Image (cartoon, helix red, strand yellow):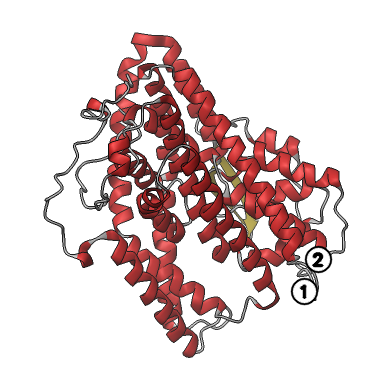
Amino acid sequence: MITRPSSAAGTGADAPARPADDAPRSPWYTRFGPQIVLALIAGVLLGLLARALGHTEDTPVWLGETLAVIGSSYISLLRATVIPLVFFAVVASIANLAQVTNAARLAAKTLLWFALTSLASVLIGLAVGTLVRPGVGTGQQAPSGFEAREVGWWDFLESLIPANFLGLEVHSAAEAGAIESAPSFNVLQVLVISIAIGVAALKVGEKAEPFLSFSRSVLAIIQKVLWWIIRLAPIGTVGLLGNAVASYGWTTMGTLAKFVLAIYLGLALVMLLLYPLLARAHGLSVKQYFSGVWPAFQLGFVSRSSIGTLPVTQRVAERNFGVPTGYASFAVPLGSTTKMDGCAAIYPAVAAVFVAQFYGVEMSLAQYGLVVLVSVLGSAATAGTTGATVMLTLTLSTAGLPLEGMALLLAVDPIVDMGRTGVNVAGQALIPALVAKQEGILDQERYDAARLDIMADDEEMVLAR
């Protein structure tokens, strides 16, 4: 149960023990933040070296290939944990609502704030796209080999219906006279299944306790494995950033540089203006917000996965912001799959304006309204994994804009995806703090305390208790 914290007791049993102020600090080079910064520098330098050796996407050299393997291997490790993490995190999070006072009100406020910040973000994105005009005068043409596939609202809604209990899809293709099958999981369907099972477990009551205890135990194990993967992020960063620099260089973006600039301008306005204003309006220190959310932001930036960053985002909410564990273990996992201000608001808004300008389409007020509607209601289409292609497809098709324009944006998608995901997780950590502050359950003393390295304590996991 969540209780209102006193000035002395904080959030009580729900809050992790606060380290002593005079606790010895570990050497700077062993901390996660400096390791990521060093990895960013190393990645850029190695990428430039590979570029100097003649590396391109068509003619790779050994250094570029090595960086690509390191980066793709790290992303594969993160993706391997997505399905079980989504399922057990959502089930455990819904089950935790039974232990939370005023659970329905907390859930309603959380979803309302998710929608309001998405609305504000998409309006910022449309304004930036209209003022910067990134699609005017590009002189580019869509590749002839690109095949656009229309995905409308009915396709999106149909994709939510599970094909089977596991949300497993099998695609078969005939090559060289043989039929090859490739299984894949639909994250949206897994999300629907996990919500249904979590709600059903709450309704069953005491008989479901063994299953819920099992789910919490499995979640703890998955988080532990994911935590080990997260600790490898500096190595993955070298490969991911190095490969991006080696493959694209500084000039490859060319005429798309204006689009990238517009995206990052919109992201900066959300991160540096919208979020601080919300924090300040709730009586929270802006400086403490930025210092507290930084670990999640930097990991989201390099990993490009909101779900992969989930354990760190939850640690930020609990340890740095003072959000009670019972509520944080519901709100943060929910946000990692449904709240995407970067991927589902800023990006599709700017991209829609870009595509319209590129093809000389004059967007009507109704089309702008459709972009806003899709961004607010369709955030789940991003599903917390890398990339925002599904959301962009849904936005363009709903607004009646040429899907061929997507081909122009795919080359720079990894570059903008880093910033998008960083903003995603920054918002996912902020909203629980705002709601907790409104409800009087935020540990203000913890929020205002000096920041320690939340990545240092590898043994203490943030669990959905």
Q: Would residue 343 be visible to someone looking at this image? A: yes
* Residue 311, position as x, y percentages in the image: 35, 44
* Residue 112, position as x, y percentages in the image: 57, 30
Q: Nearer the viewer, residue 3 or 61?
A: 3
Q: Nearer the viewer, residue 117 or 253?
A: 117
Question: Is residue 107 depicted above or below 244 in this figure?
Answer: above
Look at mark 1 in the image and give the residue it sits on.
138
Callout 2: few (<14), some (14-19), or many (20+) C-alpha neighbours within 10 Å?
Answer: many
Callout 1: few (<14), some (14-19), or many (20+) C-alpha neighbours within 10 Å?
Answer: some
Q: Is residue 381 left or right of residue 369?
A: left
* Residue 51, position as x, y percentages in the image: 49, 85
Q: Give the position of the N terminus as an image quadrant.
A: top left
Q: Give the position of the C terminus as an image quadrant.
A: top left
The part of the image, by quadrant, that contains residue 300 is: bottom left
Q: Nearer the viewer, residue 195 or 259?
A: 259
| Residue at image coords 40%, 46% | 285
- Which type of secondary structure does the marked residue at label 1 adopt? loop
Labels 2 and 1 touching (C-beta < 8 A): yes
| Residue at image coords 44%, 19% | 103
Look at mark 2 in the image and give the residue it sits on.
358
Residue type at mark 2?
Phe
| Residue at image coords 45%, 11% | 203
Q: Would residue 333 be visible to someone looking at this image? A: no
How many tags in the picture? Answer: 2
* Residue 218, position as x, y percentages in the image: 31, 33
